[in-house]
Amino acid sequence: MMLTSEQLMVQAPATAGYDALLKHGLETVNQLMHTAVDSDVTVLRDASRHIIEAGGKRIRPRLMILSYLATDGSPAALNQVSAPAAAIELVHTASVVHDDINDHGVVRRGRPSVNALWGRTFALLTGDFLFTKVYELMAPYRDLNVPLADATVALVEGETLQAQAVKENNFNRETYYQIIGRKTAALFGAAAKIGAMMANAPQNQVDMLYQFGYNIGLAFQIVDDVLDLVGDEKQLGKTSGIDVAQGRGFATAYATETPETVDEADPMVSIKRRVLQGDALEEARRQSRALVEAAVRQLDILPDSPYKQGLIDTAHMVIDREF
């Protein structure tokens, strides 16, 4: 189903304050995603809406909306950001559907995963369906497709590098940062960059916001990976312990460079012990905080505004999770 211009262009509240604008923008993103996945092939429609309606942090759309507003984008024209913001969230959503197939994940966003409810074949097709719906949403936006395509290619490359490193038993810290830079940080960076591009921001602001998003994407993934080890399923909203069980993530990269004999009967026990008894958690805190602090400093070139503060708050939000 092709979306009409009326469905894409939802009127923004021109005189609203920061909270109302952001709420409107994110609500419109949700509405557009819901509309975009309509299909008379009911399994695709139902499985797609199942994962979309489960919610999620919506950090990538938030970054795009705030970057647009912080670089002097018109609040009255905020509607024009909604479709690209929905598209970038659909890229992420499609990737987690595929992740759950690869990882045998049975919980996602606090609900049974698409894989658990519909099986591997329909989950694979649902992820493909979500990816292809991105084309439809982005068709009117021409040059904005370039940074989104770059980030999507990087995402697949990162996931592939991860699988390769695990298969070759070569998951170390250097490889880890290459992986998360591609599979997570590039999409964060693209979200902020596209927002600035839509506001016709100067190139130095566009470039800075890409790097801002990239850095907080790195920080987000470090925290997420540690929570995979030490958090519980209710806290995470997804199946926990998968990264270590499959030989990847921050904890695995740290543990492989920490001398200790691994318990071959249960490697996860050994890795978790080394992480909890050593300084890996504190190192993760240091690294994620340093990345966020660097990202926030980059915003100095922007004029002060509630939207700039919103970007700063978002940066801190990605690491203000207990671990």
Image (spheres, rainbow, N blue to C red):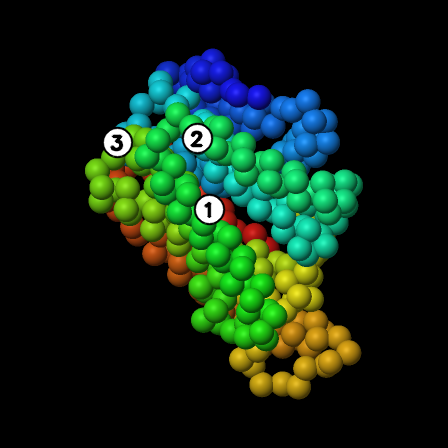
Density class for disc 2 (Cα within 10 Å; few <14, some 14-19, many ≥20) is some
**Disc nearer the start of the sequence (2/1):** 2
Residue annotated with mark 3? 200
Between marks 3 and 2 in the image, the one whose residue lies nearer the viewer:
2
Rendered residue at 44%/53% (across/down)? 154
Judged left or right of residue 38, residue 306 is left
Tell me the amino acid under the disc marked 1: Thr
Instruction: Say which mark, if any, is on residue 138.
Output: 2
Quadrant showing the C terminus? bottom right
Judged left or right of residue 135, residue 95 is right
Density class for disc 3 (Cα within 10 Å; few <14, some 14-19, many ≥20) is some
Residue annotated with mark 1? 152
Rendered residue at 68%/82% (across/down)? 262
The part of the image, by quadrant, that contains residue 242 is: bottom right
Distance of label 2 from label 1 (alpha carbons): 13 Å
* Kind of element beneath mark 3: loop
Tell me the amino acid under the disc marked 2: Met
Residue 211 x/y as whole percent: 34, 51
Judged left or right of residue 202, residue 291 is right
**Disc nearer the start of the sequence (3/1):** 1
Residue 199 x/y as whole percent: 29, 30
Instruction: Establish if 7 lies above or below 311.
Output: above
Rendered residue at 37%/55% (across/down)? 293
